[in-house]
Amino acid sequence: MKKTLIIIAFGLTSCNGLTNIDSVENIYYPDSTYFDSSTKFKLDLKNRIKFNKIEELANILFQKNLSPYFELKRGSKISKVIIFRNDHSMIQHRNKLIVRMDSVYGDKPYPIKDFDIILQRYADNNGKDYALPENFDKIFIQIELDSTSNSENLEELLIGILDGFDKVNNQGSNKLNLKIGLKYDDLIRIN
């Protein structure tokens, strides 16, 4: 009888652990509607892949009309981030925030620790300063890493971007949709 109770107690503990896994909150970028409406392909960041290989794979996926996305664990939440095409002719320079490991480049270079402050300034511009986006919906984050960077560096940078973005989105009156792209060396066909 005691053995049966121990097995049942162990089973309940194991099941309880499963419900904790099921209760993990998923956060979608740009949003769940866009995420659900696109044909996606998950890019795994766990294998220390070189950044330029990630860019190449994203390029191939775009050419096959698939939307690459990353999944990041942030505390008790899972963030699912779709990567957008970043064709040179599609995104105006003034709408881009270029993010590197240690800097954010907008109208001029800023330290990466100020990402949320710069993003807020971009979001609040509303056409006042021509060097900044005319509208908060047009903001685009472009990630540029060098050839020595890998998926671990990208994951660290993405978590910092998401933390800054969430901070701005929770404070501001305008609800931003996070659009992130990688730097691509060649043009990709626009659908």
Image (spheres, rainbow, N blue to C red):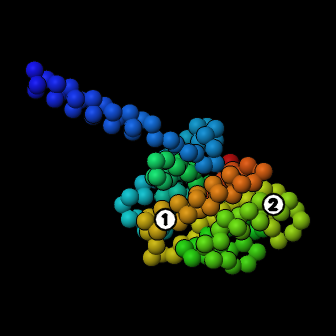
Residue at 68% over, 52% down:
170
Of the numbered discs in the image, which one, if any, rests on residue 124?
Answer: 2
Residue designated by label 1: 156
State left or right for residue 96 relative to residue 36. Answer: right
Amino acid at the residue labelled 2: Asp
Give neighbour class at mark 2: few <14, some 14-19, many 20+ (Cα, 10 Å). some
The Cα–Cα distance between marks 1 and 2, rounded to whole angstroms, is: 27 Å
Judge whether 141 appears above or below 77 on screen. below
Residue at 58% over, 57% down:
162
State left or right for residue 140 relative to residue 60. Answer: right
Residue 3: quarter of image = top left
Examine the rendering and report whether any part of residue 168 can be seen: yes
Name the residue nearer the viewer: 173 or 56: 173
View extreme (front): residue: 2
Q: Position of residue 134 (x, y in %)?
A: 84, 60
Name the residue nearer the viewer: 79 or 62: 79
